[in-house]
């Protein structure tokens, strides 16, 4: 148990600060803040991913996702199958956008 962080916002009774692997035992305040921000960001990404999995079942954008590949948004299946329909350029755009988001803390 890391005594310096056990009274931070988000700790709950009866466990207080939960760190079973002892990863934060040598952390200072900046490391603790970075880990907390990373956890919040990962939670937000997980929530958006869930919405992104459900929303295409009910809503589709009009037009083309990739005009050069003659791929319309309506042609992209839901769920995991969408991963196989996305052209490489689309994956590159997603990777650049994720990298851009990593530059700025949320």
Image (cartoon, helix red, strand yellow):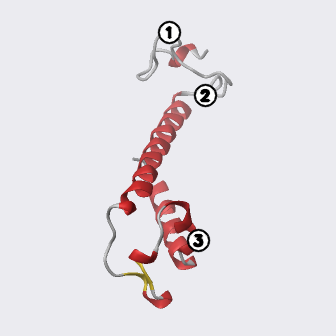
| Residue highlighted by disc 3 | 84
Marks 3/2: CA–CA distance: 41 Å
User: How far from the left and from the top, in percent, is residue 81?
Assistant: 55, 66
Q: Which of pointers 1 and 3 indicates the residue nearer the eye? A: 3
Marks 1/3: CA–CA distance: 46 Å
Note whether 14 is above or below 73 in the view shown. above
| Nearer the observer, 7 or 46 | 46
Please indicate whether residue 91 sits to the left or right of residue 72 in the image.
right
Residue at 50% over, 15% down: 6
| Nearer the observer, 56 or 99 | 56
Q: For the residue carrying disc 1, how many other residues have a C-alpha within 10 Å: few (<14), some (14-19), or many (20+)?
A: few
Q: Earlier in the sequence, mark 1 or mark 3?
A: 1
Q: Earlier in the sequence, mark 2 or mark 1?
A: 1
| Residue highlighted by disc 1 | 14
| Residue highlighted by disc 2 | 27
Note whether 51 is above or below 10 in the view shown. below
For the residue labelled by badge 2, is the local secondary structure a helix, a strand or a loop?
Answer: loop
Residue at 49% over, 55% down: 102
Please indicate whether residue 23 sits to the left or right of residue 95 in the image.
right
Q: Earlier in the sequence, mark 3 or mark 2?
A: 2
Residue at 53% over, 74% down: 86
User: How far from the left and from the top, in percent, is residue 84?
Assistant: 59, 71
For residue 45, the mark is: none
Q: For the residue carrying disc 3, how many other residues have a C-alpha within 10 Å: few (<14), some (14-19), or many (20+)?
A: few
For the residue labelled by badge 1, is the local secondary structure a helix, a strand or a loop?
Answer: loop
Marks 2/1: CA–CA distance: 22 Å
Work out which quarter of the rendered image holds the N terminus and state it. top right
Note whether 100 is above or below 45 in the view shown. below
């Amino acid at each position: 148990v890391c005594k310096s962080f056990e009274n931070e916002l988000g700790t709950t009774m009866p466990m207080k600060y939960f760190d079973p692997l002892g990863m934060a035992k040598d952390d200072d305040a900046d490391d603790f803040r970075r880990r907390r921000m990373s956890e919040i960001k990962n939670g937000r990404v997980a929530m958006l991913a869930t919405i992104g999995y459900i929303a295409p079942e009910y809503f589709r954008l009009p037009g083309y996702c990739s005009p050069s590949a003659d791929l319309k948004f309506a042609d992209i299946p839901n769920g995991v199958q969408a991963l196989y329909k996305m052209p490489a350029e689309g994956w590159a755009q997603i990777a650049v956008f994720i990298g851009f988001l990593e530059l700025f803390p949320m």
